[in-house]
Image: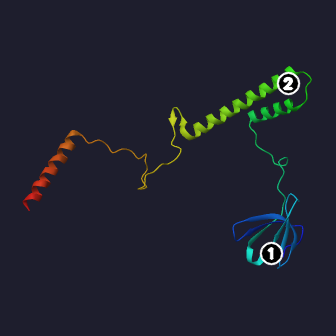
Amino acid sequence: MIEPGKHVKYFLRNGMVLEGIVEKDTAAEVVLKALDGESLIIIHKPAEDIMMTKVVLTEPISEERVQHNLTEAQERIKAKLHEVQQPVDDPELQEKNLTELRQMVLEQERQIIVNKRREHFGSPGAARQAVPYSNPLGLSAYSPRPKQKSIAQKAADQEARILRRQFSRRR
């Protein structure tokens, strides 16, 4: 049994996942307090219904503690956003800051699209196959085409076919 106050996730036989803080955990019933604290969840037959229990040992890391690797453009946008959020008495300056911020965001979005296109299609000078496509036989769709036979090879093949037909008719 799990001690009260623990943060748990119960995986039930019907596919549901219940998450909350344990209020009561006995063989007869389990009572969970919802994470928002506004409701209780009661499982009447935990031995039959619960397949697996996950006890959450650490609380989720807040966004402030996580350090992101921001690009230079993202750093500039973040600085501009903080500048725009500061109250300014001059409405023209505020409007100018907002316009600059929108332009910076648009430029970053364009750069992201360019990078994704380059990653998927390659650059104009060096096209790149992003996905190894194949056919149902497992052969690559980009395998080299067979070389064209020369006129002499075609004539020799034609002659061989004629000889085979004549030989098969004689039997």
Could you say where residue 87 lies in the image, as x and y percent from the top left?
A: 91, 29
Could you say where residue 69 lies in the image, as x and y percent from the top left?
A: 76, 42
Q: Under tag 1, what secondary structure?
A: loop
Q: Is residue 5 left or right of residue 134?
A: right
- For label 2, the residue is 94
Looking at numbered disc 1 in the image, what kind of residue is underneath it? Answer: His
In the rendered image, the residue lying farthest to the left is 170
Could you say where residue 116 lies in the image, as x and y percent from the top left?
A: 61, 39
The quarter in which the N terminus is drawn is: bottom right
Q: Nearer the viewer, residue 32 or 157?
A: 32
Q: Residue at x 58, y 37 (%)?
A: 117
Is 27 above or below relative to 118? below
Could you say where residue 90 lies in the image, as x and y percent from the top left?
A: 90, 21
Q: Residue at x 24, y 40 (%)?
A: 150
The span from disc 2 to disc 1 (Cα, nearest Å) is 59 Å
Where residue 43 sits, quadrant-wise, is bottom right
Q: Nearer the viewer, residue 4 or 141?
A: 4
Q: Residue at x 43, y 55 (%)?
A: 136
- For label 1, the residue is 44
**What is the tally of numbered marks visible in this picture?**
2
Is 41 above or below relative to 75? below
